[in-house]
Amino acid sequence: MTRLRRRGGFAAVTSIFLLGLAAMALTALASLTTLEARRTRADAQQAQLRQLLLAGTADIRARSAHWGDAAPKDEKWEVALPSDLSGDGASLNCHAAAAASGGEERVTIEAALDRAHASQILALRRDNDQWRVESAALQP
């Protein structure tokens, strides 16, 4: 009879150990799933910010068609966004300022979505009676 009890105790300890091991595995899996969900959300936010910067570039190109020979000095404006983006806390602002070098204008585009931000500086130059984007630099 004592042998049966020892086997029963061994089986109970093994069962408890395996249950603990399974619980640790499930906890690790839940942590990894949460981490991946956060990363996916952050990637989607960054993609949306890049799209907002592209929309800002398109807005500047459309506005620059009406600037004539001289771009506005120190002008700021907000780009209108669809209501679903505005409702999510998105904003898109532009600021035109003359650059130090002759004939070149700089426009800063600032995009925000929730707590994430992105900005880029466009360099524009007048060429053949229209403004052309010469360069775009993302800002940290």
Image: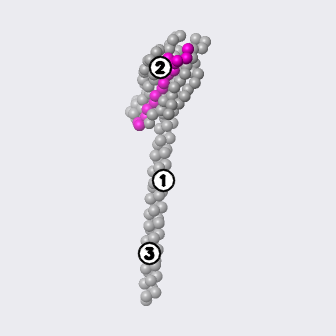
Q: Is residue 87 above or below residue 66?
A: below
Magenta highlight on residue 104:
yes
Q: Residue at x 50, y 17 (%)?
A: 98
Q: Is residue 3 above or below residue 24?
A: below
The residues bearing labels 1 and 3 have C-alpha atoms spaced at a distance of 29 Å
Q: Residue furthest front?
A: 100
> Which one is in front, 106 or 33?
106
Q: Which residue is mark 1?
A: 32
Residues at badges 1 and 3 in contact (C-beta under 8 Å)?
no
Q: Residue furthest bottom?
A: 1
Residues at badges 1 and 2 in contact (C-beta under 8 Å)?
no
Q: Which residue is mark 3?
A: 13
Disc 3 marks a residue whose amino acid type is: Val
Secondary structure of the residue carrying tag 3 is helix
Q: Residue at x 44, y 83 (%)?
A: 6
Q: Which residue is mark 2?
A: 96
Applied colour scheme: one colour
Tell me the quarter of the image containing the N terminus: bottom left
- The x, y position of residue 15, in whole percent, is 45, 72
- The x, y position of residue 75, in whole percent, is 44, 18
